[in-house]
Image: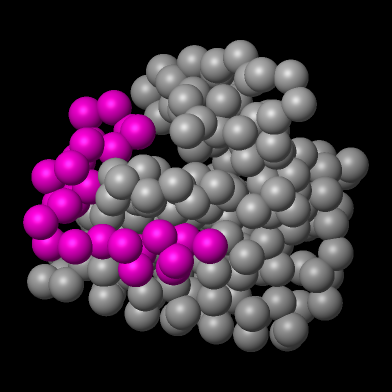
Amino acid sequence: MSLPAPARRTPWGGVELLERAIAYTRGSLALVRADLMAAPTPCAGWDLHALLLHMHDSLASLDEAGSARVVHRATPPAPPVDLVDSLRVRACRLLAEWSTDWAADPRAARSAPAGSLDILVDGRPVTSSVLTSAGALEIAVHGWDVAVACGDNRPLPDELAADLLLLAPVLVTAVDRPTRFAAARPSRPGCSPGERLLAFLGRAPR
């Protein structure tokens, strides 16, 4: 996922948005069973186990950003024995880390103004608000992916999806397709915000 410099008019949700995304995805993680690890996911070429490994890596990067203010993506963390339990623990930890950081820096609670770049991602400066909003988008959509792989229909909450829809066109650009995301799909008239978000990210809503 690309991480652009923030635009002044983009309503970055920050930690509050990240919290809602994590709450939704924790519900999906509760569906995971050992016998489903080889199940296909909406992410082309990934089974459920591979998706959970990717999510673990992503949460580790967000956790690193919250604590060290720098993200190095060179070496992913070693996979834990119990992926689901580790994901739950890491999600709670990173949310606590970012919430503490937000409280200590009142600027981060507002829409990030251009120029207030304070975290390095692979050497590139990115605002806290942009990074946590990008994390919220990835966590929420992968939460939906997990539920689909487990054979369950867990629509993205309308309010969460609507907020993510405002950010998705800025966070997911042509550079991200077709490697990180498939081409956008058309969405049917009158569909929910969640269905529109999934279609924009190249997924076929169920």
Relative horizontal placement of residue 86, taking residue 153 as reference (left or right): left
Rendering quarter of residue 8? top right
Colour mode of the rendering: one colour
Which contiguous range is marked in magenta?
24-49
Q: Is residue 195 above or below residue 113?
A: above
Q: Is residue 4 above or below residue 74?
A: above
Q: Give x and y (percent) for residue 41.
A: 29, 38
Q: Give x and y (percent) for residue 107.
A: 83, 70
**Residue 164 magenta-drawn?**
no
Q: Give x and y (percent) for residue 82.
A: 16, 72
- Name the residue rendered at 61%, 14% in the picture: 186
As rendered, which of 173 and 43 lies closer to the eye? 43
Q: Is residue 81 above or below residue 202?
A: below
Relative horizontal placement of residue 138, taking residue 79 as reference (left or right): right
As rendered, which of 81 and 150 lies closer to the eye? 150
- Name the residue rendered at 47%, 25% in the picture: 204
- Name the residue rendered at 55%, 16% in the picture: 185
Regarding residue 54, the answer to whether it shows in the image is no
Relative horizontal placement of residue 19, taking residue 35 as reference (left or right): right
- Name the residue rendered at 63%, 40% in the picture: 194
As rendered, which of 130 and 70 lies closer to the eye? 130
Regarding residue 196, the answer to whether it shows in the image is yes
Q: Give x and y (percent) for residue 11.
A: 82, 49
Relative horizontal placement of residue 152, taking residue 109 as reference (left or right): left
